[in-house]
Image: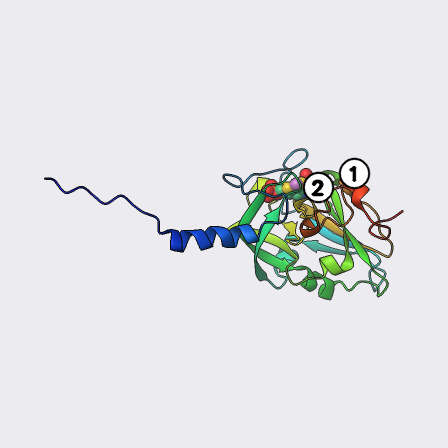
């Protein structure tokens, strides 16, 4: 009798807890899709390093706007953040390793006025998202230039995107060009179009009709 090879058995003792571990990381209503979807509104912009500028404006401490060239911006201190990514359309991309510049490094370089409570993140073509200052100023919020140790592809936001892992992914603005410091809250692109002003996936804050008083501007 020829030897029959053993079928490959995946030990449920090992696999099951892993699956469950990932599932406990899924906020309510989310699922894990095949692959890593790419999603945005409009076209992918071209990056021109010579003319590219990153602007910080609005309520800065000094009252002046600040502009970084690509060279200056890429010399800011760096960090790595391991995080899951939750789109309001219900897919979640698990275990992304983002490399880039922590929001705190930008705040240190261009200090905001002490009255700043919110920020608006601006991208190419006028896409924007607003954040509470506390959501921006978190150790896990960063301006990512790399995903899984490789530079971002154009579709993922090259050369730089914001990543706010603890909020729905529409707040993770690709192709960022400016940060506006705000004394009062104002709605960004999707927040103006019926999405929740805060967007916490663990509370399923998907739509603006779910907002409580105080969650957003009147
Ligand atoms: N500039 C810009 N950033 C954007 C968007 C967009 O339309 N324009 N879409 C957002 C949404 S809704 C999602 S789910 C994520 C998708 O990121 P990904 O393409 O890397 O998966 O990007 C966010 N950032
Ligand atoms: Mo999204």
Residue 149 seen? no
Q: Indicate the position of residue 187 as horizontal and vertical percent values.
A: 81, 45
Q: Seen in the image, is 1 located left or right of residue 155? A: left
Q: Indicate the position of residue 179 as horizontal and vertical percent values.
A: 75, 52
Q: Residue furthest top?
A: 42
Could you say whether the residue bearing mark 2 is in a helix, strand or loop?
Answer: helix
Tell me: is circle 1 under 8 Å from ligand 1.
no
Give the numbered dot on residue 194.
Answer: 1
| Disc nearest the viewer among 1 and 2 | 1
Q: Nearer the viewer, residue 133 or 17?
A: 17
The correct choice, above or below, for 174 with respect to 63 in the image is above
Q: Name which residue lies at 39% across and 55% down.
A: 13
Q: Seen in the image, is 213 located left or right of residue 163? A: right
Q: Nearer the viewer, residue 40 or 71?
A: 40
Q: Which residue is mark 2?
A: 124
Q: Nearer the viewer, residue 138 or 71?
A: 138
The correct choice, above or below, for 102 with respect to 84 in the image is below
């Amino acid at each position: 009798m020829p030897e029959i090879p053993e079928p490959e058995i995946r030990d449920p003792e090992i696999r099951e807890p892993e699956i469950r571990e990932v599932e406990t990381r899924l906020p309510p209503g989310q699922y894990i899709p095949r692959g890593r979807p790419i999603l945005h509104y409009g076209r992918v912009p071209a990056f021109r390093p010579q003319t590219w500028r990153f602007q910080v404006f609005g309520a800065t401490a000094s009252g002046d706007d600040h502009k970084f060239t690509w060279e200056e911006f890429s010399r800011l201190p760096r960090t790595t953040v391991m995080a899951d990514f939750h789109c309001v359309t219900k897919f979640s991309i698990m275990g992304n390793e983002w490399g880039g510049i922590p929001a705190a490094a930008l705040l240190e370089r261009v200090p905001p006025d002490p009255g700043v409570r919110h920020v608006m993140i601006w991208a190419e073509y006028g896409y924007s998202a607003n954040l509470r200052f506390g959501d921006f100023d978190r150790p896990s919020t960063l301006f990512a230039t790399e995903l899984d140790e490789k530079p971002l592809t154009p579709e993922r936001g090259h050369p730089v995107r914001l990543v706010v892992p603890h909020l729905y992914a529409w707040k993770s603005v690709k192709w960022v060009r400016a940060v506006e410091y705000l004394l009062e809250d104002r709605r960004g692109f999707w927040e103006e179009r019926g999405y929740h002003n805060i967007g916490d996936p663990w509370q399923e804050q998907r739509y603006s009709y779910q907002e409580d008083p105080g969650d957003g501007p009147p």
